[in-house]
Image: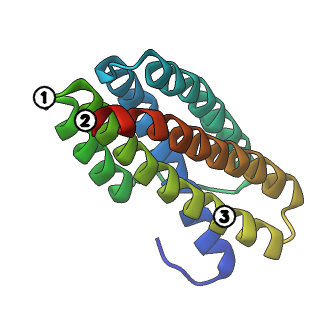
Amino acid sequence: MSLKSLGDVYVDQIADLYSAEQQLVKALPKVAEAASSSELRQAFETHLKETEGHVKRLEKVREALDEVPEVTCKGMEGLIKEGDEIVSEDGDEAAKDAALIAAAQRVEHYEIAAYGTARALAKQLGRTDEGQLLEQTLKEESNADEKLTGIATSINSQAV
């Protein structure tokens, strides 16, 4: 893809986010299953449902654009690979849950940055409806990160 305009950058960001969210839909069930804390498992399962909604919102945004290339989000690919390594680890359950939270929060921060950028681009380009969809997802990603922080407080105490 050639980046000749801010619109091209926006399309590139949407394509990357779409790939990232599709990868997460596949990865989250494994992460949820690896969690020993029922609260953490439930948080991952809830976020899976939200992530499926993020994909649907991105599909609406993609429909509003002329052409969106199919790409693979390499950043998310790497984050998921790191998470997979944790999933396969043995050891103390609380320590593993703490590591899963750390990996999940890196994913959330990546998404928060990406959605914040895409929302700002949509606003700059006058794509108000799309910007609202992106804002809705950005809020959900931020809420997921805050929830993980709350769960971490309890789990990290157990892991000490």
Residue drawn at the location 87% of the way across and 70% of the way down? 126
Q: Is residue 155 above or below residue 73?
A: above
Tell me which residue sits at (31%, 43%) in the image.
80
> What's under tag 3, amino acid-wise?
Gly
The residue wearing badge 3 is: 116
Please identify the residue farthest to the bottom as the structure is shown: 4
Of pointers 2 and 3, the one earlier in the residue sequence:
2
Is residue 15 toward the left or the right of residue 28 in the image?
Answer: right
Please tell me the numbered disc located at residue 91: 1
Q: Is residue 129 left or right of residue 133?
A: right
- Mark 2 touches mark 3? (CB < 8 Å): no
Q: Secondary structure at mark 3?
A: helix
Identify residue type, mark 1: Gly
Query: How far is the residue under mark 3 from the one under mark 1?
Result: 36 Å
65 sits left or right of 83 in the view? right
Local packing at callout 2 (Cα closer than 10 Å; few below 14, some 14-19, many 20+) is some
Task: Locate residue 1, reporting x and y percent.
Answer: 46, 70
- Residue 14, picture quadrant: bottom right
In the rendering, at what x and y percent does residue 61 appear?
72, 48
Q: Which residue is mark 2?
A: 95
Q: Position of residue 94 (x, y in %)?
A: 29, 29
For the C terminus, the quadrant is top left
